[in-house]
Image (cartoon, coloured by chain):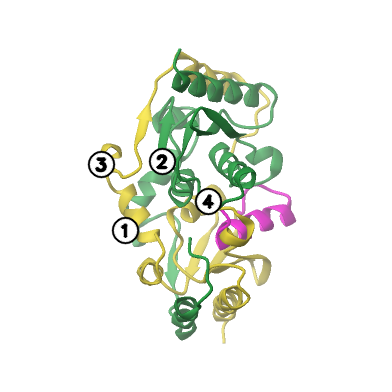
Chain colours: A green, B yellow
Amino acid sequence: MTNQQLFIRKALKLALENVQTGKGGPFAALIVKGNNIIASGTSLVTSLNDPTAHAEIIAIREACKILGTFQLRGCEIYSSCEPCPMCLGAMYWARLAKIFIASIMQDAANAGFDDAFIYSEFSKKISERKMPMVLMPQNEALEVFKEWKKKGDKVKY
Amino acid sequence: MTNQQLFIRKALKLALENVQTGKGGPFAALIVKGNNIIASGTSLVTSLNDPTAHAEIIAIREACKILGTFQLRGCEIYSSCEPCPMCLGAMYWARLAKIFIASIMQDAANAGFDDAFIYSEFSKKISERKMPMVLMPQNEALEVFKEWKKKGDKVKY
């Protein structure tokens, strides 16, 4: 068995345990660097009262804490399922190198999860989405960005 | 001044302070229920070493902690800028009622942020994205979802 297969099966094992122990949904993820597992996470939305506590988000946060960095360049993520938009966005911000998945969003949708619905919302014009988004332009908004641009000692991300 | 204007200006004030104090990027968000601010957040990616610590994610997590829930139905979010894909996804998972913003993703892009790039990645086929995603189908993957479906006492989210 290759390391890749070991990692993806490990993620699935954690996902199964997460359901069986009642901690949360059927999802888990690992952050891997080279041949080493840096961190793992499972879905803890309902046990932590945190809608952002998806497996991938937890694994990314934990790996960053362990490595002392806010970017995971050179790391890969093994996830039991295709990431939802929130988690895919987090993977981009973390600058992960590659994503491995064991199932796809339709599998999650069939199990009652909103991933596919949320992706479909993203592909619509803002005015056609179920969640209304209202632009309230303010002069101060541009001032905030100006302040950022002129700041000499800022840490970019 | 309406409450909506007060809230959006409060978000901009927090965003400006976040830059000036060196805590992080030029973003802030408030969670509002009725006429009350439940929680706020600013971008703390670089000061917390956490790529998921965007203003909106922090505000959502904090509001859920305060309200003791993993969904924010009936709450609205006031954000200094249009949410990135990660944060928009989090807003859907939190079931927020409405989003108010003071600037748009092009403003963030002009200040050096990846929001627009990440949205453009979402609109591409998986095979054409910069971050490769590899499907490794496993029999265990479907077992995990079966376990979830048959679990009688699960908390759906």
Q: Percent x, y for residue A62?
A: 62, 42
Residue where numbered disc 3 is placed: B128
Query: Closer to us: mark 2 or mark 1?
Result: 2
Residue at 45%, 38% in the rendered image:
A83
First to last magenta residue range: B52-72
**Tag in front: 1 or 3:** 3
Q: Position of residue A65 (x, y in %)?
A: 64, 47
Same chain for the residues at labels 1 and 3, yes or no?
A: no
What secondary structure is the stretch in magenta mostly built from? Answer: helix
Q: Image quadrant of residue B152?
A: top right
Eyeballing the image, is B122 above or below A25? below
Residues under labels 2 and 4: Cα distance? 23 Å
Residue denoted by label 2: A97
> Taking A85 as reference, is B116 left or right?
left
Name the quadrant containing residue A133.
bottom left
Name the kind of residue labelled 3 in the image. Answer: Glu
Q: Disc 2, disc 3: CB below 8 Å?
A: no
Considering only order in the chain, which callout, 4 or 3, is on the residue closer to the N terminus?
4
Q: Are marks 3 and 4 in contact (CB under 8 Å)?
A: no
Residue under circle 1? A125
